[in-house]
Structure formats: structure tokens, C-alpha cells
Image (cartoon, grey):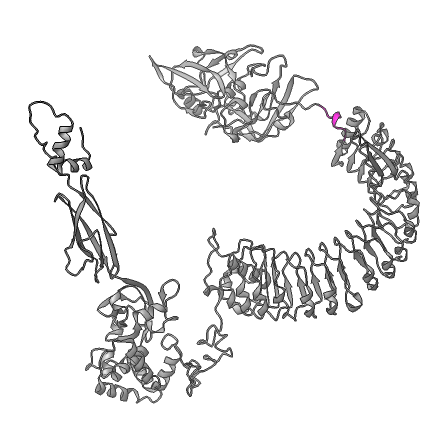
Amino acid sequence: MSLTPKLRKLIYGSGLVATTLLTGCGGGGGGGSATPEAPANVAPTVAIAGANQSLEKKTIEMAANASDLDGTIASFSWSVDNPAVELTGADSANISFVAPSVEENLEFVITLTVTDDDGATATSSLVFTSKPIKKSLFIQGLVKDEKITYADVTLEIGDESFNVRADSQGTYSIDLEVDERNFDNLVKITALGTEDKHAGVKLISLLESFNTVKASETSQEFVLANNYFGVNVTNVTTAEYVLLKRLNNGNEITTEARLHELQQLLAADFKQIQELASVLKVVIDNPDYDLPEAVSDTLELLNNNEVYTQVLSEINSDPELIATTILEIWGDHDLVEFPDTDGDGILNICDPANPTPNTCDPDFDNDGYLNEVDFYPLDKNKYAPTIGALTFRPDPGRNSSRFRHCITYTANVVYGVDGSDLDDTSILEIKDLDCSEFKEMTHTDNLQYFTHLNSISFKNAQLTDLSVLAELTNLKSLSIQNMPELVNFDFLTNLTNLEKLDLTGSKFNNLGALVGLTKLSNLNLNGALVSDLTSLSSLVNLNSLDVSYTQVSDLTFTESMTNLSSLYAHNSNVQTLPDFTKLVKLNDVSFYDNNIVDISPLANLVAFTSLDLHGNKIKNLNPLSSLTSLQTLNLSDNDINSLAGIEALTELTSLSLNINPITDFSALSSLTKLEALNLSETGVSDLSIIEASTALTYLDVSNNTIVETEVDPQTQEETVTVISSLTDVSPLAVHTNLTTLLANNNTIDNFNSLNTLINLQRLNLSANEIVEVSAVASMAALERLYLNANNISDLTDLLEATTLPLTLHIAGNPHSCEQNNWLKEKAESLSLVSDFVGNEECKEPVLRDAITNKPVSAIFKREVLNLSRSGGSTNLGEIDMVACIGAMWNGYPLCWESNSATSNTPVCSAEENATQMICKDTGWDLYEYPVNSGKKWKIAEWSLEFDSSIPAGNVFRDSFERRLILTILHTDYARIYNGNGDEFDVCPSIGEGQYQCTITGDHFEGEISWVQDFPNAHFPRCSAQAGSSIATCTPGASPDALLNAAYNGVIPELDDSQSFEVDFSKIRIVPFSERSTPVECEDDICQP
């Protein structure tokens, strides 16, 4: 019996209860009632849950993870081996403590002991690490009077110091990791000269606190002179340090507050700073002055009043030296953050809130560019950075910036500047940027600097933010096309100088941003997400407006745009046109594909020569009668029944009326100057109405059979009734200037009358009821003729014609296949017909390969493989020349013996119904055979035999010529490959100087095996009688025979005594469809 902890406590907790329980159980004979011995107590288990490390000063919490199998935890006791750590809750399951402040990682041990209700204990310990709080910072600056090369630089921050050596340019760079205790301490930088010429040079720069310096870092955590000037250690910073320390009674300055207080006191004393800095510069730079022996370094010189006074007196012996040196200092922006660069006596130092006399120079370098626009305010020779000075981020997935490429492209195309010269080009010389070719552009770094841009264009770019454009207020032209990721166009508000704005295909809908752009003369909103454009009425200087592919329905907002010359609003929702009497300069409009019904406002466009109104809902054409200057008019796809109104448009030369339900064509009789007329799908049936339009060169009267379809409600059968149709084209005989006539899909049965159209170049009479084609004989200029789907049964007129059109379509006619094919042959023989389409059923059967099912004609256009045919450095004769192409002929790969060292694709031909194809291989160079015989060969002629009585599954259904054996073995010169492309170099020995060669592969079933007396695996030579399945083979030449042949220039000898037979009836070539062949090898021979 096994007792649970709970039951064990119940039993052994009271002897009385135990006795009672045992008695109740009928405790057995002998009269004894002994108490059972209690089992041993099980000790508890414990573990500490919590972090094992943290930064100093952090509050840490830990918990006991304890349990007792046979009881409960009675007490907890926590301890720590570091007296500096105070535990809260040391006698409970959970404690907390504060990680102690440390300068380096500090480890201490926390121990937990638990006791159960029977007094057993368990202990667990955890090693905890308290880490110091530190901050990192990278500082780079200069040690300079003139440059101090290789100076030893020390940075002191509280009780921490860091050392580094400057480079040959005086530049130092240092990575700092500063402890929290020094975050509020000042940064002091000391530089000592190390070279002979700089012996005794000691320069100091005192900076603000570490935290303040770090706050000025860039996004890359760098502090450079351009964001905290004090990192440059110079003669000026040293002079300031000496003077600040004097003001502090000779004591070191230790707090930032005191430093600021002293700097304020020193601010007005420029002369003293200038003097000390100048003395240092003379002593360090001027070879005529040395550091006095009485002082050890330049810092001591400034602090020793007696020696300093003596040196100053010597320097003042040259009355110009101090003044010249001061000017040099204030002109050097590495020494002074705000110098007097131009020497005009007005210091660059500028505090707009509290200006002082002789300060706040608006043009530091006096180059004519104010400081706020001068990218180089301290250099009178430069005022903007060059392209090469800018850094461009690469676009994602690329190693370069597409915006940088745009700059290069524009500079080359627009300005003729070579890419190599662009780096030295100022950004302000770039006036135009065309970025429309750079679709993968994702950002426009540095664009804000191109403030002299007049124009910039983007197209299909992946830009999502162009807010930077708000800074380019000089822009006159801006194009942002097809950029769906860009949705915020608020930047447009700032661009008040814009004259041209193209937002084609954008998601622009902020019309408020355009209201103030009153200088706009050209605005393109094609495809924008706009509908109500009323607010644009303020753009009175517009001369071109495109609102096509929008949802605009009312164009009356344009009536205030009196300078408008072009207005495009096609493919929109336009219903209401403006009053054109107010738009007197308008000369070009586009209103097609809209919902316009009323065109009466157009009556005022009397000067227009062209008008496109197709795809609307126009019914009444009378308002157009005043447009007598019109020459081109497109009214296709409307709801026009009557042409009344256009009879006055006698200057028309081009008129499109197609896809209209016209019932009255009489107005056409007045249009005698027409050169192009489209009456397709209008229902015209009488062409005499246009007899007076003899200038016509283009006429489309196709698709003019109007039918009515009735559906029987019971049977659902359709009954089609022809209402009207164009059947007679004889009135067109007078139109001898026609070059294009489209009359397809009508019921015309005769076009003999058109034999007068001698200038006709294109004639389409497809899908009519034409029977004969004699009129074609007189159409000598005809280039394209379409007669398909008619009732032509006799092609004699075309067969007897001396020439044929370049395009001739006669399919779908009841002519004979014999005439069809004769006409096809004639077209091919003339070599001028590029497009002949005859009846499909008349095509000759295509001879196809038995395994690949590819047309045979295509097989012999395949690329030749293994072009090099030479057997090595010495040509060993024709016997070793084998050429192959990647194709099959009736089931086996195509290989043949070649007389040339290289082979071309073969040219093959055969008699009709022949079973043999004769092929010729024209090599690319002459081949001498036999060697040294003087006989040159170039053309190899060979044959392929086809026996249709043999099933396609048997590859060898013709003669077993050696080329077939070589093919199945996948052989090349003096090598054998198996079906997997693995080369046999050596055949395995079977003893007594014999070697067994065996070839298998996934391209055939069975195996080929033979024995030879040399190990090298060279291919055998085989031959067989036609119709036989047995081939007799001889092993390839031995290495000795090959070597002898090479030396003597003869054909290698073969050992006939080792011949063997192969029964190819037992070998089956596996079709490609059954092989595990790589995709790229399908239908080809995968040569090794």
C-alpha cells in the first residue's frame, strides 16, 4: 500500500487515530497493536526566478520557485554576499533590490534557503551582474593652427580619459564610451604636437558637458565641427580657454553653468581673444619666431605674462603682422565658426535677438549671395555644393541612387556634361531635371538643395513623398505622371511661380492647392481624381487645360479663362459645355467619349478647322452649320439619324459617321471636297449619294447589312431578316482617285464595275456574295486584297494575272484545292506576296517525325551540335568525323559521317512519296582526305531511309549504317559515353589481358558489350546489311595504333580479330516521352 502525503500526515499525526483505524480493519491475531514506523521526510526543492543581470540603479525583482512533495514550505530566507545590496522581503517568497552603482561590471551572489514543515531545507544561488550605464559617441575634429599633423589628442571627461593620434591632415577621430557618473562633466580636449616642427605645441578646447555635446550628434551618432564647432582644437579655442580660466581666478572650470557664465563675460572681449590667438599662430607657423626657452609649450606661453609680453613686443616690431594674422584667423572657418571672412570689419557672429555693433554680417564672404542662400558663406569663390559633394542613398535592392542617375542623365542630355565632369558642377547650375525614365526611384535625397531648378519631371516612379518640392519655389514647370503611391500634394501650395503643371494619371484631388497658382498657363489633370472643378476658375492665365479621363461633367468653370487656346476633356463625364463666346482664343478642343447631347455652344467655334465629337449622345447636327471652316469632323458612335446641318460644311475633307443609325444621307451630296469618308455601320445602301465627291481617296462602307432577329418564344429558334443591305457598288466607278475601299460584310455579288479604280491599293470585299474576280486584273496598283468568305469558285483570273497583291486572302471560298495550291505556288514564286491565306483544308499533309511529332521541315532547321569535328591535333581521317544535330528522323537521333572538320546544318530533299531523303552537309572549311593526299573535300552527301512497314517503336527500321551505331552509343572521337552522359575512360579487366566494355543508359533498353585487349574505352566501328538486325563491330583503335597513326599521318589500324556482333532487335530506343530527361533536353540530343 502506498500512502499519499495527505493520508500519511493524517495517520502519523495522531497515534489514537492510527490505532482506531487499524482496529477497524480487523488487525489480526496475537493481540498486539504496534504503531507503524513513519517514512522519512522528503526535502523541498527550490529555484530562483528572475533576471541575472541589469544596468545599475535598476530595481530588480526575484521570486522563489519552491515546492515540498510531502508537506509545505514553512519559511524563506534570502541573503546576498555584497553588503551594498539591500534586499527587501528577505523572509518572503519574493524580494526586490536596487542594482548597485558600479564603474565596471560587478558580480555578487544571491542565495535563497527554504525550510519545510518538517524542518528539511533546500538552497539555490544565482550570480547577478550589475552593469554600468554608459553612452557612446563618435567625435571627429581638427587640430589646427595651420594643420598640426600627427598630434596626440586626449579627451578628458571627469575621471575618464581617451587618447588618439591625429592623421597627416590634423584630423582626429575617436569613439567614446562614457560612464553615467561623467555625463554632466565638461569635455576637455588637449592636443600635443609630436613632430619637430610642432615641438612644444599644446592646444586646448573646452566643451560643454558630455550630455550637451552628445545632444548635437547627427542621426549617425557623429559629432563633427559642422554640428559642434568646439571639437576643432585650435589657437582660438586655446586662447578662449586661457581667458576663461583667468576669469575663473585661475581655477579649472568644472560645471556647465559656470562655463556659460564665463563665456557670457568673455563674449564682448574679441580683441583679447584675437591677440592671444594671433600670437599663438605666429609662434607656431612663422619660422622667424620660436617658442621661448623659458616656457615648455604654447599653453604655458599664454599663461606666463612676462614671457608673453616679451614675445608680443617682438611680434609688434612688424606693425602689420598681428593685423594680417588676425585677418587670416577670422577668414579661416576651421578656426572661427563665424569669422569676418570678407575682412569688411563686420564680424560674421550674429545674434539676431541681440545684435551688437560690427556684427551680423549678412554676406560673410562678400560674394553677392546672402548667407541664407549661400551654401558656402565662408568662401567667396563658391556659393553652392557641387554634385560630387552630396551623398545619395541607394534605392532598395540597388547599389546606387536612381535620383543621382537622373541628375547624370539630365546633365548629359540637356547640358552635354559628361558624367565624369558632373562631380565638379554646382547644384545651382542645374536648372532642369528629367527623371521620367527612372521608374525605380524611391527617394529624392538632396533635391531641396536644387533651388535654382526651373523644371523637374517624374514618371512611373515609386515615390511616396514629394513634400521637399515645397522648398523649390523657383519651379516653373512640374510634371508628376502615373505615380499612384503619391497621395499628398499639399506642397503645390508653395509653388506659386509654376507656369506648367502636369499631374497625368495621379491620385490628385486637392484642388485647393491649385487656387493660388495664378501664373499657371498649362495644366494637365488627365486621369486625376477630380470631378467638380469650379474652384479652378481663378486660373485666368491658363492657355491649355486637360481634364480628360476625369469625372468632370460641367465645363462652364472655364468661361473665366479668356486666354484658353486648348481644352481637352475627352473620356470623361461631360454633359454641359461652356459658353464659347467668352473663350475667343480657343482653337483646339477634344470632347469625344462623353455624354454630350446638346452641342449648341459649339456653334460659336466658327474658326475651327477640326472637331472630334465621337462617342457622345448627339442627335441634332444643326448647331454645326455655322462651322464652315471645318475640314475634319468625327461624329462616329453617336445617335444621329439625320445629317441635316452639315451640308453647309463644304470645306470638309475628312468625315467620320460610322456607328450611327442614319436614315437621311442627303446632306452628303454637297460635300464635294471629301477625301476620306467613313460610313461603316450606318445602314447606307445607296452610294449614288456621294457620286459628286470625286476627290475621295479613302472610303469605308463596310458592315452595312442591317438585320432584324426574332426569337420564337416556344422553340427559341431565331429568325433573321435582312432589313437593308449594301449590294451595289457600281456608283463607285467614278471615284478613280480611291486608294482604299473597305466594303466587307455586305451582300455585294459583283464588283466588275470597279475595274476603273486603277489607283486602288487596298480592297476589302470579304464576307460578301462575290462570284468572280475579273476586275482585279485592271487594278495594277493593288497591294492588299481581301476576298475571303465569298462565293468564288474559279480562281483563273488570279492565276492568269501577271502580278499579285502583297497581301492576298481567299480563304472561305468554294474554289478547288488544286487552284488554291496553284495560286499559293504562284504567290511564292513571285517572291513578293508576304501574306497569302488560302483554304485551310487545302493545305498539304505535314510530314512529321515518328517520335517527336514535329514537322520534318522544322527538324532540319535546328542548330548543329558538336561543331568541332577534328579528332585532335592530327587529323586521323574521315573514319573519325561524325556530325550530329539536335533532331530525330523517324525515331533515331540524326548523325552522319562528315568530310569536313566542321559541319553546317544539313540541307535535305526527297521525291514525292519517296522513302529516302538525300541530305548534304556543307562544311565550313576544306578537308583533306586521305591525309597528305592533296585531295580536298567540302560536301558530304548521305541519305536517310524510311520504311513505313516497320512499327515506330523499332528505331532501326532501315540499314544499319555505322552512323546509327555511333549515335546509340553517344560516341565522340576516341571516347564513349553512356546514356547518362558519363564518360568511359577505362573498361574493367577480366584477366589475361582482356577487358570487358559494357554500355547501358536510360536512352535505350538492353546493353551493348564486347571484349578487347586494351583498357581504353574507344568507340567500336560497326556495319550491317540493309534490313538486317545484326551488326558486326570491331573495337576502336588501341592507344598504340592511334599514336602511330598520329605520328605517321595515316588512318589508325583496327584489329578485326576482336570483332563482335550486336543484335539490335534486342535493343529498343526509349522515346523522349518515356525518358527521365531534363526539360531542356527534350526533343534534342543531350550531348556530353
Snapshot quadrant of residue 823:
top right
Residue at 28% across / 87% down in the picture? Answer: 312
Query: Looking at the picture, does residue 375 appear above or below residue 868?
Result: below
Foreground residue among 379 and 229: 229
In the picture provided, is 762 more to the left or to the right than 871?
Answer: right
Residue at 39% over, 63% down: 219
Q: Is residue 249 left or right of residue 845?
A: left
Q: Position of residue 812 (x, y in %)?
A: 79, 30
In the picture, measured across the screen, residue 469 lies left or right of residue 40, that is right
Task: Where is residue 1047? Give x, y as percent.
Answer: 43, 25
The answer, for residue 340, to whether it is visible in the render is yes
Residue closest to the eye, 423 or 644: 644
Q: Is residue 52 visible?
A: no
Q: Is residue 890 highlighted in magenta?
A: no
Image quadrant for the N terminus?
A: top left
2 vs 215, left or right, is left
Find residue 198 and report its horizontal and vertical position in percent: 26, 74
Place residue 573 in its image quadrant. bottom right
Query: What residue is at 6 percent from the left and 25 percent from the top?
Result: 31
**Can you say whether 56 is above or below 955 in the image?**
below
Q: Nearer the viewer, residue 915 or 214?
A: 214
Q: Is residue 153 above or below residue 1029?
A: below
Counting from the top left corner in percent of width and height, residue 598 is at 81, 58
Image position of 328 with respect to 956: above or below: below
Q: What stretch of residues is rendered in magenta? A: 838-844
